[in-house]
Image: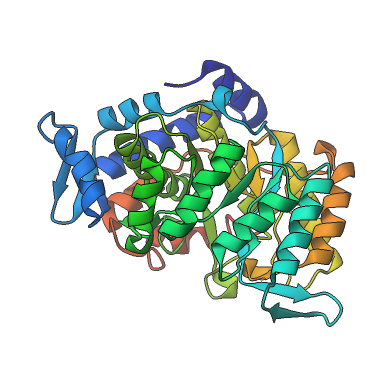
Amino acid sequence: MLRQDRVDISKAALGEGTVDMLLQVHEDALWILENLGVGCKQPDMQAAFQPFEAEGLAVVYDGRIFVTRDLVERCLTDTPGLDDFFVPLNSFFVGGTAPYIYDDEAGLGGVPPTPEHVALIARMADERRMIAGMGRGVKLKDEVEQMGIMLENCSKPLYFAVTSDRSLERAREIHQQKKDIMVVFCLTRPPLEVNENFSENFVKVARAGLPLFISAMPMGGISAPYCYNGTLAMTHAEVLFGICAAQLLSPGVTCVHAGFPTLADPRIEYNPNYGLISHNLINILMTHLNLMLDLPSFQSGGTTHEEHPTERAYEDARMGQALCLKYGVHMMRHPFAFLRYLIDFSLAKLDRASRDAESVTPDDAPDVVMPVYDQRGMESIQRIGLGMYMEDPLTTANFGRIFVT
């Protein structure tokens, strides 16, 4: 299941100790799926796992699905790998979904996006050399209209959401025109629960054979242990569950591991801080694990904690992009236009940051200390299970020691 060539690349980039940590993260995620399971009430998803109960490969019980390592490995074998995927390594996307546009002239956020804004974003994504493709960027009320605008104005790979039969039919039509699309689902919500608002559409998209972009966002210090490997393990487990569900519903469907490990910052009332060097690093580490498993991968980097497009916001973008180039990634979202908490999307920031990216080099990356395995992360998972981690002794022990720069 491991690609030895990717293991060697990761060891050269990250060091053997960090690669050993990532391989143990995979083992920990398998333990989570076998012992904690994932809450799921969606009948078609339950039905997809139930035939494997007789073989001892899965258990569907009391609204939870428990998946064994053997079934995970079988599903990963069926999942198309990097060589069959349509986006090259080290690609930066206009991705994510901000609810608002930032008014660059007034210096204020909170502007409802319009179709004209989406068209501008799509045209810029199509024109800029450093932008490999686009997600929505912002969210229009009519997702079918948004799909059409993206298709009309951007010839590069696209990803978008499908939350209705109408948008599913439009996605099928677009996929017939161009194969380089993905349908995004944040299938799970912490801790280890299927988001039932999206589960039925996930089933329909998987059965339609459309490429699936499967995201998950456990937050270290809240819904995951406050260490690198603990947060990565929870994120990885949730996405592996989504990949297994997709493969059982539609064997051979393309699945992108879009696990988005996120860090709570106790200095800002446990909100996520996307401007941390650590945020970029943990997402880069997620990518490396996925590439070693031969999974197309889509993470987050180059974002900021700035509320406005300040010079610091542009420095954060360069820092994140440089780290990605130094250590290597597959696809990265959020690197150009987003502001604090991914709430506002700045067209001016998209313009400048995508131009600045042309001059970013690996030499611009800050120094980082590569993490190694912290056994306390798995001990926290075994102790807390489906609970929250704010009062976990590991969280308080690591205050000020990790995730602070």
Locate residue 221, reporting x and y percent: 46, 62
Number of marks in the rendered image: 0
Give the residue displayed 24% in from the left and 35% down from the top.
Answer: 68
| Position of 21 relative to 32 (above/below) | above
Residue 147 can be seen in this image? yes
Give the residue displayed 13% in from the left and 36% down from the top.
Answer: 53
Q: What colour scheme governs how the chains and residues are painted in the rendered image of this protein?
A: rainbow
Give the residue displayed 29% in from the left and 39% down from the top.
Answer: 31
Which residue is nearer to you in this view: 214 or 173?
Answer: 173
Q: Give the residue at the far left of this rendering.
A: 54
Locate residue 57, reporting x and y percent: 19, 32
Locate residue 267, reporting x and y percent: 59, 72
Question: Along the horizontal axis of the image, is 272 left or right of 30?
Answer: right
Residue 337 can be seen in this image? no
Which residue is nearer to you in this view: 270 or 209?
Answer: 209
| Position of 242 relative to 81 (above/below) | below
Which residue is nearer to you in this view: 319 or 342?
Answer: 342
| Position of 5 relative to 191 (above/below) | above
Quarter of the image containing the N terminus? top left
Q: Quadrant of residue 338?
A: bottom right
Locate residue 111, reporting x and y percent: 70, 79
Quarter of the image containing the C terminus? bottom right
Give the residue displayed 29% in from the left and 59% down from the top.
Answer: 386
Which residue is nearer to you in this view: 296 or 318?
Answer: 296
Q: Give the residue at the far top of this rendering.
A: 4
Q: Quadrant of residue 90?
A: top right
